[in-house]
Amino acid sequence: MLNFVVRVQVPNLGATMEKLNFNLQLCRQLPYLTQFASRMTPDYDDAKDLVQDTLLKAIRYERHYRHGSNIRAWLYVIMKNTFLNNYKALMRKTALIVSKRRMLANPGQRTTARNQCEDKFLFEDIHKIMEKMPTMYTQPFLRYFEGFKYHEIAKEMGIPIGTVKTRIHFARNFLKAKLKMYRFDH
């Protein structure tokens, strides 16, 4: 006698029911989310957009929700973070627009885009000044400029860290004093 085993694949009804339950809970929170959004922004359309963004994020990140916990509190956190992120992005965009308007309003004002010729003169002047400065100041300054730490320079030169810091400080001030003509706040 032959025995046959027939396996029937049944969809995971537990996961489907859990998904439906989650969606139902989201729908029940709609009036509370709308009220919370209207407290954050007085504009009706912005409030509706905020609710919609919150629901989309809730659905997208459902796996992070602990079923059985306070869904309203979870949704409020999502909404608050969404609102703050949108606000910060708006502030960055506004600041960029304002700075662009200022640049256009003051065409004589120095901008970040500079002439390459000016850079060439600056580098030539730096090299001339560095040649005039004593080696005991230029060597630690250049090593620090190359990315070495104070203690590495001190070990390499065989001098205390305090001396390294003093020499680098002196070199910076010396360069700053000699390169006043290149300052941006003139």
Image (tube, grey):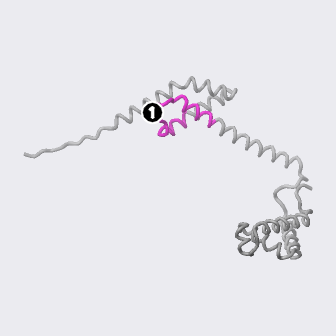
Q: Nearer the viewer, residue 61 or 174?
A: 174
Q: Nearer the viewer, residue 71 or 23?
A: 71
Q: Nearer the viewer, residue 129 or 81?
A: 129
Q: Is residue 67 above or below residue 105?
A: above
Residue 173 point in image, percent of width and height: 87, 64
Q: Residue at x 71, y 73 (%)?
A: 155
The residue at the far left in this view is 1
Which element is circle 1 on? loop
Magenta: main secondary structure equals: helix
Q: Nearer the viewer, residue 174 or 57?
A: 174
Q: Is residue 177 above or below residue 48?
A: below
The residue at the far front in this view is 160
Q: Residue at x 81, y 46 (%)?
A: 99
Position of 93 with respect to 54 (left or right) is: right
Residue 40 point in image, percent of width and height: 67, 29
Crowdedness of circle 1 by 10 Å Cα count: few (<14), some, many (20+)? few
Position of 4 with respect to 103 (left or right) is: left
Magenta stretch encompasses residue 142: no
Q: Is residue 158 above or below residue 18?
A: below
Q: Amino acid at mark 1?
A: His
Q: Residue at x 77, y 43 (%)?
A: 95
Q: Where the N terminus falls, by quadrant?
A: top left
Position of 136 with respect to 84 (left or right) is: right
Q: Which residues are magenta?
A: 55-82
| Residue marked by disc 1 | 67
